[in-house]
Image (cartoon, rainbow, N blue to C red):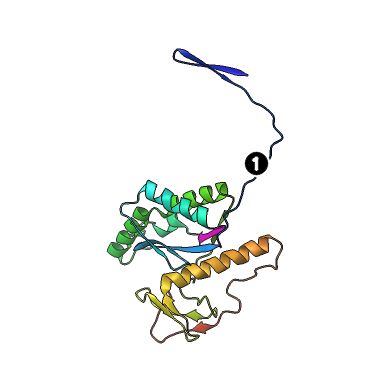
Amino acid sequence: MTFTRKGRHWYAGFTVETTEVVAVTSPAGEAVGGDLGVEALLTLSTGERIPNARPASRRERERVSARLAREHSLVVLEDLRIRNMIRSAAGTVEEPGTNVRQKRGLNRSILDAGWGKLVQFVRYKAERAGGGLICVDARGTSQECRRCKAVVAKPLSLRWHSCPCGLDEHRDVNSARVLRDRGLAVKAASEGGQPLGDANVGRRAVRRPGTLLAA
């Protein structure tokens, strides 16, 4: 037992042992993937696009993360290296930067979006809710078709994913669904499934003339 004095009052603290087991229930909802962005803070594999309030609000990030943790048993997000993404737009003397003005603007947008804080909140709240967060490699998610796994090359300016297999949907929704599937594969492997191997194995390239790959 401990005694603590605060102002004019004394408080006693003590511990007790109990055999009661408190069960932690997991969220019943299916796994969800989320593609982080600047225009939309988060595009979900459900097709929902969560708008990006500027500047980033801690309360808004907590609200979004709490809802994801409450409604989904597993949340899959991008494993982003934000510090590398926002490194100096001007570059160095040896390697000067290109498109400096545009890069600085993108850096500000990434910081304003508060991606790092959102990921932290989701991880914490998902674990408390009995679910989980998996961050997976995001390379190529907007180029890979989530239905047939082909690589459909398209520039960053093209916001729609159209694949010869017939899939036609918003680029970010496709990315979120690819992320979700990668996260489920990681989860299955961690639970004793088959090794994942190279994530690019078995993917076919479908390239359009004159286009550059963009993640």
Q: Position of residue 135 (x, y in %)?
A: 54, 59
Check the image and report above or below for 61 versus 192: above
> Label 1 sits on what residue type?
Val
Say above or below: 179 vs 161: above
Q: Is residue 101 left or right of residue 137?
A: left
- The image quarter in which residue 22 lies: top right
Whether 71 is among the magenta residues is no
Report which residue position mark 1 lands on: 22
The magenta span reads 73-79
Count of numbered marks: 1
192 horizontally vs 28: left or right: right
Residue drawn 57% across the image and 67% down it: 182
Q: Quadrant of the C terminus?
A: bottom left
Q: Is residue 131 above or below residue 173?
A: above
Is 10 situated left or right of 201 in this image? left
| Furthest-top residue in this view | 8
Residue 174 in the image, given as x and y percentages of width and height: 46, 72
